[in-house]
Amino acid sequence: MTSVITGDIIDSRKQKSKDWVEGLKKILSPFGETPSQWEVYRGDEFQIEINNPEEALLSAILIKAHLKAIKLDARMSIGFGDKTHNAKKISESYGTAFIHSGELFETLKKQKVTLAIRTGDAIIDEKMNLMLQLALTFMDNWLAQPAQFVGVAIENPNLSQEELGLKLGINQAAVSRRQKRAHFDLVMNLDRYFRTQIKQLTTP
């Protein structure tokens, strides 16, 4: 089983493209090689394969946080399933993970939802998407500073508040404020619950 994130930059036409395209590529580069594991295409769309499906939601939240930190946002669908054709470019690869991600992505634009998942299990999908919609009530409104905190905290899960403060150039009290403003503990609880649901799918 694999997972595929399909996304695009919201209101990209209002931005100066050169400013954010490089920023987006920098955000995606830790996910592996381009264009086999991730690719930016049609100017403002992107696709990423996350080989460990349990990491998929946190990966999407990390991308969102990094974009919010540079005052952008993305619409993303996460599809789960198999990969039956492995092309040189991820956008030309195929399988149920790609179908689920691509079909869901088309519906997001109409629903004005910025993040959703499709596993093919209707019960898990309904539960997780309801939880995601609730979480998006604050994640969609992250300001740059709390979003920057979320990005650094996800990338450095073992650091204390003081150590995160050193990375961000702020004191521990400011770290604590940003953590609260971002509802970071709730985000991590959501991620933990999501992992238990995906484990059920991947365990025979």
Image: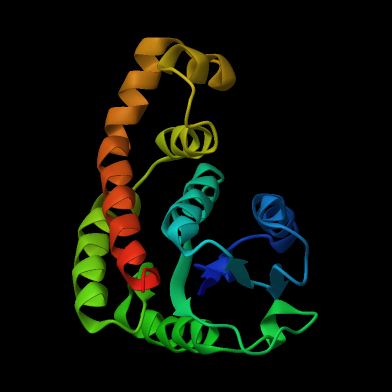
- Considering the image in quadrants, where does the C terminus appear? bottom left
Relative image position of residue 34 (x, y in whole percent) = 78, 66
Regarding residue 88, the answer to whether it shows in the image is yes
The residue that appears at 31% across and 45% down in the rendered structure is: 187
List x then y, in percent, for residue 130: 19, 67
Image quarter for residue 18? bottom right
User: Disc count in the image?
Assistant: 0
Q: Considering only vertical position in the picture, is 137 above or below 200?
A: above
Relative horizontal placement of residue 74, taking residue 25 as reference (left or right): left
State the colouring used for the structure image: rainbow
Let me know if residue 42 appears in the view.
no
Q: Residue at x 45, y 10 (%)?
A: 171
From the top left corner, tell me how far across and down residue 42 is, in percent: 69, 80
Residue 83 placement: quadrant: bottom right
Q: Residue at x 40, y 84 (%)?
A: 104
Residue 31 against residue 79 in the figure, above or below? above
Depth check, front residue: 132 or 173: 132
Q: Is residue 27 above or below residue 79?
A: above
Residue 174 falls in which quadrant of the image? top left
| Residue 76 locus on image (x, y percent) | 46, 69
Which residue is more in the foreground, 134 or 196?
Answer: 196
Q: Residue at x 77, y 61 (%)?
A: 33
